[in-house]
Image (spheres, helix red, strand yellow):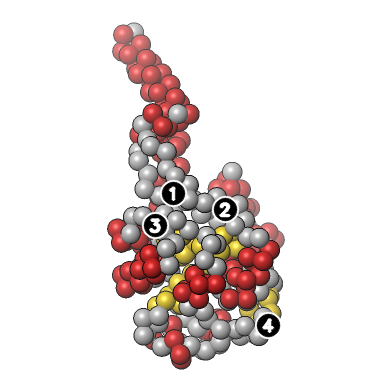
Amino acid sequence: MCAAVYVLSTVTGYVLTSALLMKCPNLLHRRKREPFLSKHISHRGGAGENLENTMAAFKHAVDLGTDMLELDCHLTKDEQVVVSHDASLLRASGINAHISDMTYAELPPYLCKLGVTFQRECFCEGGEDKRIPLLKDVFEAFPHTPVNIDIKVNDDRLIKKVSEMVVNYDRENLTVWGNVSNKIVNKCYTENPRIPVLFSLFRVLQLLGLFYTGLLPFVPLKEQFLEIPMPSIITKIKGPDRLTRSQRLIAWLADT
C-alpha cells in the first residue's frame, strides 16, 4: 500500500510539475527573441507559379507580400554559393552534370518548363529569367526580406561561405538555416550560433517524444524554427488512389 501511494504521489507530482512548466516555460528558460514572424513562406521562391529558385520567382513572391523566401544552396567548382535545389543539373537543366563540378560561368540555364515536384502532374513555364542565381543576388535584391536557407549538402566550405555572406550583408536577424540532417544543423550552429537554425528531422521526432513524455520543459532548445512538411503531401505527389490503406492511415496519423 505504501509503495502504491509513493508511486502515485511521485507520478502526480511529475505530471503537475510538467504541466505547470509547459504553461510557464519562462520559469526555467529565458524567452527567445523572435527576429521575425512568417506565416506565408514561398517554397523555392514560389515554385508553383514561376521557375523555382530564380530571381523572377523571388521578385514575384515579394511583390505578392510573402513573409519569407525559402531557397536551397550549393557550391560551384569555383566556390560560388548558388541557389538551386538539386545537386545534379539533370532535372532542371537537362545536363547530366553536378553543380560542384562546374564553375558558375559554366552553369546552364533552367529548362523552359519544369515539373513542380510537390504537386502531381503540375508544371511551370518560365519567362526570360532562367538563370541559376547567386545567393548574394538574392540578398542584394531583397535586403529586408527574411530568407530560409536549406544547406543541401554536408560541405564545411558551403556552410562557412553562407555564414560569412549572412554576416557581410548584416542578415543574422533575417535568416534561418539548416537541413533535414541533424549533422548539418549542428555544423551550422557551431559555425555561427547567432543565425537561427531549424529543427532537423531527428530533432523534430525528439521534440515530439519529449512533449508527450512531459520532459520537454526540462530540455533547453538551441533551435528557433520548425519546418515540418505534412506527411499527407504524399497524396499530392502519388495520388490517393495509388496509396495502400496502411499508407493512408500512416499519413493521417502522422499529420494528426
- Res. 69 visible in picture: yes
Which residue is labeled 2 in the image?
38
The CA span between labels 3 and 1 is 10 Å
Within 10 angstroms of label 4, few (less than 14), some, or many (20 or more) residues? few
Q: Quadrant of residue 152?
A: bottom left
Within 10 angstroms of label 3, few (less than 14), some, or many (20 or more) residues? many
Task: Of the two numbered discs 1 and 2 on the same chain, state the one appearing first in sequence.
Answer: 2
Q: Nearer the viewer, residue 112 or 204?
A: 112
The CA span between labels 1 and 4 is 36 Å
- What amino acid is found at the position of numbered circle 4 in the picture? Gly
State the image coordinates of residue 197 (x, y, percent, origin top left): 41, 55
Q: Nearer the viewer, residue 69 or 245?
A: 69
Q: Secondary structure at mark 1?
A: loop
Q: Secondary structure at mark 4?
A: loop
The CA span between labels 3 and 2 is 16 Å
Mark 3 or mark 1, which is nearer to you? Answer: 3
State yes or no: discs 4 and 2 in contact (Cβ < 8 Å): no
- What amino acid is found at the position of numbered circle 1 in the picture? Gln
Residue pictured at 36% horizontal, 55% vertical: 194
Which residue is labeled 1 in the image?
224
Q: Is residue 136 left or right of residue 161?
A: right
Task: Of the two numbered discs 3 and 2 on the same chain, state the one appearing first in sequence.
Answer: 2
Within 10 angstroms of label 2, few (less than 14), some, or many (20 or more) residues? few
- What amino acid is found at the position of numbered circle 2 in the picture? Ser
Which residue is labeled 3 in the image?
195
Which residue is labeled 4 in the image?
127
Task: Of the two numbered discs 4 and 2 on the same chain, state the one appearing first in sequence.
Answer: 2
